[in-house]
Amino acid sequence: MEIAAKEPSSVLWKHLKIAMAEFLGTAIIVFLSCMGSCFGIQGDQVFSMHTSLTAGLAVATAIQTFGHLSGAHVNPAVTLNALIVQEIKWQFLFSYIGAQVVGSLIGAGIFAAVTNDASLGIQADGNGVCVTAVNNDITVLQGLAVEVLLSAILNLAICASWDARNSDKIDSVSLKIGLLVAVLNLGGGAYTGASMNPCRSFGPAVLSADWNNHWIYWTGPIVGALIASGLYRFMFWENKKM
């Protein structure tokens, strides 16, 4: 029996489903990450363990909730990674990245809506609230290198989670990736805020109108993802079962 071709409406629905999942997932991680790093509400001093666990478990929450719907990339760099290792088709690129950017803005906006004005001002270190920033004790190029390296480590692990040889180990992938994000934040947070995600940095930058070195938080994660995906695809990726 001849298989009927897919109706256009089914393709449109898939785009909408992916976009909604990525929009909500990105909004969640920006919203929760900003709440976890908000001075005033959280106290005069926010400890790195607190902010790191908040960021990591927010990512775990997004993956657990939306991973089966869109893969829960919630990060343009991860989406480019997925494109290179052929986890997604290029036709879906805008459905992912467009929704992530909008989700970043909405997540930051909701955070602002539930936070008092005094806590949304410029912080003691001169940076906007929840804005990822390069530590004054390192150079801008060192900050860029940190974002590239952290993003490469993250995306290598994500490639490994997509590998068919890991198909029997996906039950706890949300927690694994969440804890990886937490440890990368613990290690790199003091250097650059350990963004590893342009959308984690974009919404808060818009909220605070703080664009200082913002280009690092697009360039670093994207370059790191390209390095990781290229290395994994051409060195480790196998389409056949071992």
Image (cartoon, rainbow, N blue to C red):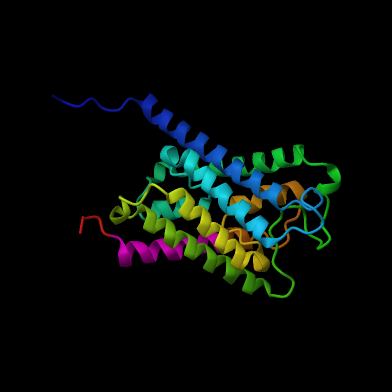
Image quarter of residue 136: bottom right
228 in the magenta segment: yes
Question: What's the magenta region?
Answer: 220-237
**Residue nearest the viewer, comparing 67 with 88:** 67
Q: Where residue 8 sits: x, y (%)?
A: 36, 26
Vertical arrangement, residue 223 with respect to residue 166, above or below: below
* Residue positioned most to the right: 118
Q: Where residue 14 sits: x, y (%)?
A: 41, 32
Image quarter of residue 103: top right
Q: Where residue 74 sits: x, y (%)?
A: 53, 46
* Residue appearing at x 48%, y 45% in the figure: 63
Q: Where residue 165 sits: x, y (%)?
A: 28, 56
203 in the magenta segment: no
Specify whether 125 is left or right of 201. right
Mark yes or no: residue 79 visible.
yes
Vertical arrangement, residue 175 with respect to residue 144, above or below: above
* Residue appearing at x 61%, y 58% in the figure: 195
Mark yes or no: residue 95 visible.
no
* Residue appearing at x 41%, y 39% in the figure: 68
**Residue nearest the viewer, comparing 147 with 40:** 40
